Each structure stands twice: as C-alpha cells, then as structure tokens.
Image (cartoon, rainbow, N blue to C red):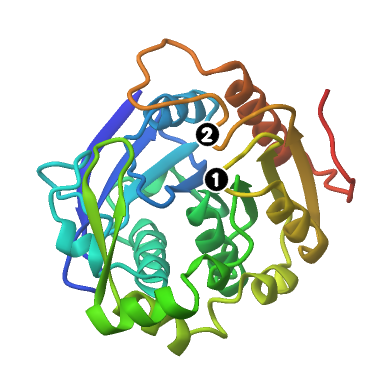
Amino acid sequence: MEIKKNLVIEGKHGKPIVADLFFESENKPKPIVIFCHGYKGFKDWGGWNLMAEWFARKGYFFVKFNFSHNGTTPDNPTDFLNIEAFGDNNYTKELDDLQSVIDYLLLPDFKYLEHLDVSDINLIGHSRGGGITIIKAAEEKRITNLITFASVSDFGSRFPKEKELEAWKKKGVRYITNTRTKQQLPHHFQFYRDFKENEERLNIQKAAKKLEIPHLIVHGSSDTSVSIADAGNLFEWSPTSKLLLVENADHVFGMKHPWDEEDFSRDFKYVLDNTLEFMETDDKDLIDAYGD
C-alpha cells in the first residue's frame, strides 16, 4: 500500500491544506474517496487512518486532509498550535479548501493521476464536515456519491442567540473549550459575519434539495452532539437518499482519540460496511432505513 502523508496543498486563504493519500500500488484507475473531518477535528483523529487504509485495501484512492484553518500546522498536524487560525476559520473557507483538494487531484500533472478514476468521486463528511460536503456536492457536478456521518442539517442554529450574540459582537471573540485538550479555542466574530454574508450559499436545506446524486445519511441513535433529528431533516430534503440509523451509537460510532486498536469499533465497522455497499451498488432506490 502507498501512503503519502502530510502533502501540502496551496489553499485560497493564505494557509496550507495538509493532506494524506492512501492507495494500493497497482497501476490502475481507482474510485476516489475524499473525507472531511468535523468541528475541532483533524485528519489523523482516532480511527481515520485505519479507515483510510481500509478503503485503500478495498480498491479506493482515499484522501483526507486538515482544513487550512482548523488550528493545526504542517509540522504539527494533530495539535491545535495555531489557535489564531482556528479563530479565523469559517464555513466558506472550508468550502474553498474542499474545492482546492478536488481541483488538486484533478490537475493534469497530478503525480498519481494514473491511479484515479476521475469519473467516480465520493465525498464523506463527518459532523460539521457533513454539512460542508452536502453544500459542495450540490455545487460541484463532478461528485458522484455523497455519504454523511452524523451530519448537521443547519449551520445557523448552531450560533449563539441574542445577548450572547451581542456580547460576542462587542468583544470580537468568544471561546470554546476543547474537551480533549482543555484548550480555550477562539472564534472571532468574523465567523458569524461571514455566515450572514453567505447565508444563501450556506443553507444546507437548500443545498440538500438540489442534490442530484445518491446520498447515504448515517447517524447514531444515541448521538448527543448532533441530534438524530438532523438526519431526519436531511433524509426529508435529499431527493435520492438512504438513511442508516445505527442503534445506540454515539457521535463517533464508538471510536475515540487516540485509537490504538487494530480494528474498528463494532458500530463503525457496521457503518463502513454499509458505506461500501452503498458506494458499490447500482440499486440506490429510496428506503426509510436499512441495516439489522
């Protein structure tokens, strides 16, 4: 297996996008999977490397990356050492980053182009990254399948309201605790301002309704970070969607960081098996839910 770690892709916003490529070395075109991490996430979180290797063994060209302003750096891709960059992040930057990754892979001089089946591009997004992939899949006609894990269905409702919003505007910054590292991570008010300026584009409902490709919506029934109602919303809006509800699963389907096991959690293995089946089947008729 070929594993290319921490490749630097030039982004549109002054900071690099750091990406990993996983693929089998046989020289033949492979379907592409691009994975987007979620809020306070990063490409090497938990079992994401294990997932990348799993997809590569199944014959896919798997790409995962750190959003340019997620707080990590090329030298430290797993630590939030650039908290000012974290504070300057917003949804439109993440959409631009994802577009930069797609464009990078499809360059005529891309080093590993002979390994790519550019007619088969699959997006997978977790949590906030799910919302990003929904919007991008509605915009980018080269995407062929969309899979969202524990995705949010609305960005606007996740911002503070009224007095808290006014206090944020007045101070210019508010802080969120990273429960894993105990860091106080900043959100500059530009985050909200950028959302309001681009509210039409950042409407996940409108984007989902415009989708013209198959969409697998995966959600754990015991997710306390993103309500299962978000999955119901997406299933209602997305025209050609399947809903996979994972009984008693949490927001990360039983995975954690660090993940030192040789295999996935039971719930996440179930998710991946069903994701692979979804991507490889031609029969994507609408159904309410499927699984055990």
Residue 12 appears in the rendering? no
In terms of image quadrants, where is residue 214?
A: bottom right
- The outermost residue toward the front is 163
- Camera-nearest residue between 104 and 225: 225
Which residue is the site of mark 2? 252
Give the image quarter of residue 83. Answer: bottom left
Residue drawn at x 33%, y 44% is 42
Residue at 68% across / 42% down in the picture?
218
Q: x%, y% of residue 224? A: 59, 41
Image x and y of residue 266, in percent: 61, 16
- Residue drawn at 42 percent across, 47 percent down: 37
* Along the viewing direction, whichever of 101 and 127 lies nearer the viewer: 127
Q: Quadrant of the C terminus?
A: top right
Q: Which mark is residue 280?
A: none
Disc 1 residue type (three-letter):
Ser
- Mark number displayed over residue 225: 1
